Amino acid sequence: MTAEAGFDDEVLSEGSPALDADWVRSLALRHYGIEGEMRPLTGERDRNYRFESARTGERFMLKISHPSETPLVADFQTQALLHIAATDPELPVQRIVPTRDGLPSFSSDPGDGLPRVTRLFSYLPGTPMPDAPRTSTQQLNLARTLARLDLALRGFEHPAGALALPWDIQRADSVRGLLRHIADPERRALAERSLDRFGRDAKPVLAGLRTQPIHNDFNIYNVLVDPGDTDRIAGVLDFGDMVRAPLIDDLAVAAAYQLDPAGDALAGIVPFVAAYHAVLPLTREEVNVLFTLITARLVMVVAISGWRAARQPDNAAYLLRNNPLSWARLQACDRIGNDAASAAFRRACGMNQSHEHA
């Protein structure tokens, strides 16, 4: 277990051990009856593989979880996908493919004595959003899709929701000890100011906001679009950071990745917030804390990714892919200020002193 000044997460601090390709192939054949082309996929913690059936041409994604991830946490994600399939079957999320014995998951051991939760998912076709043109229509559709996803998860309950899980904005102040590794004093001070605001303005009110299971990683790298109509959202991926948390945290995570630091940063996310609100109405208290949560998420990105990359140099490029842009976004947020941002969000959501959405 790795711990540093309040930040403690074995799954985040250790890379997932490599697996023998022949063992993975035999696993897929034995439990799912699948054989054919296998291609490793990138992943933050798990080992992921794309399979294309030699018999049918159908594609699947085999996920073998990090050995430090408990079966309870993996089941949280599995049951969430099953719940979504039942409550909003039109949502473009992966489907759980059962084993030959009808199980949604099972435990596998590659021979090192470290059992891993193993699952097979349907493979969603589409173009990764970072590879597609960005438009305002696409952005609004993305916000609406997130709102639908949160509505689908609204009635879902699972015991893992009570666990402290990675990338939970509620725990943003736990990364403060990692800031000492930021060499640039101006950047370090920027991150510290953001965490100070989180502790003063957001953390005290989070307990009073509505909570539910949330995706918690709704960034453009986890979204696919239709190649023939890139404004249409074709897939939402990676439920590996799910957590039970204030609902507004999910919007904060997503909005953090929509912020354009090169232009009018605020103008870029206000329509996104309004589009979400039109599908799933927010309360005034949620809107007032949103901008502080956005900046807290950006601090978590730069702090945790830099810390992990130093410990996993072989995976550093993947871990740091959002780092420079996240610093630019954080600087843009610092220039805007919480008061101006919150006022803009309230106007976009049609809120004023005499009206509040429930």
Image (cartoon, rainbow, N blue to C red):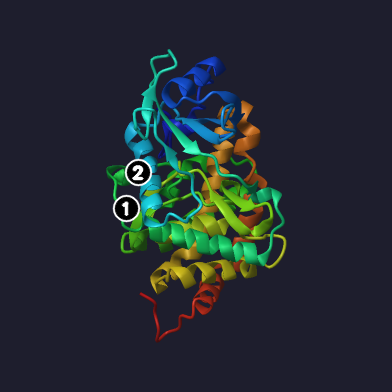
Which is nearer the eye, 323 or 57? 57
Classify residue 135 as left or right of residue 160: right
Q: Residue furthest top?
A: 111
Q: Residue furthest front?
A: 55
| Residue 197 seen | no
Identify which amino acid the numbered label 1 is placed on: Phe
Classify residue 73 as left or right of residue 261: left
Q: Which picture quadrant has residue 287?
A: bottom left
SS for dot 1? loop
What residue sits 69% from the left and 55% below the top? 228
Q: Which picture quadrant has residue 212?
A: bottom left
The local crowd at label 1, few if under 14, some if 14 to 19, many if 20 or more residues have their Cα within 10 Å, is: some
Which is nearer the eye, 130 or 44? 130
Residues at marks 1 and 2, CA–CA distance in whole angstroms: 9 Å
Image spot of residue 260 (x, y percent)? 67, 60
Q: Which residue is mark 1?
A: 156
Q: Quadrant of the C terminus?
A: bottom left
Q: Are marks 1 and 2 in contact (CB under 8 Å)?
A: yes
Q: Which residue is mark 2?
A: 79
SS for dot 2? helix
The local crowd at label 2, few if under 14, some if 14 to 19, many if 20 or more residues have their Cα within 10 Å, is: some
Which is nearer the eye, 199 or 148? 148
Decide which of tag 1 and tag 2 comes sooner along the chain. 2
Image label count: 2
Classify residue 301 as left or right of residue 90: right
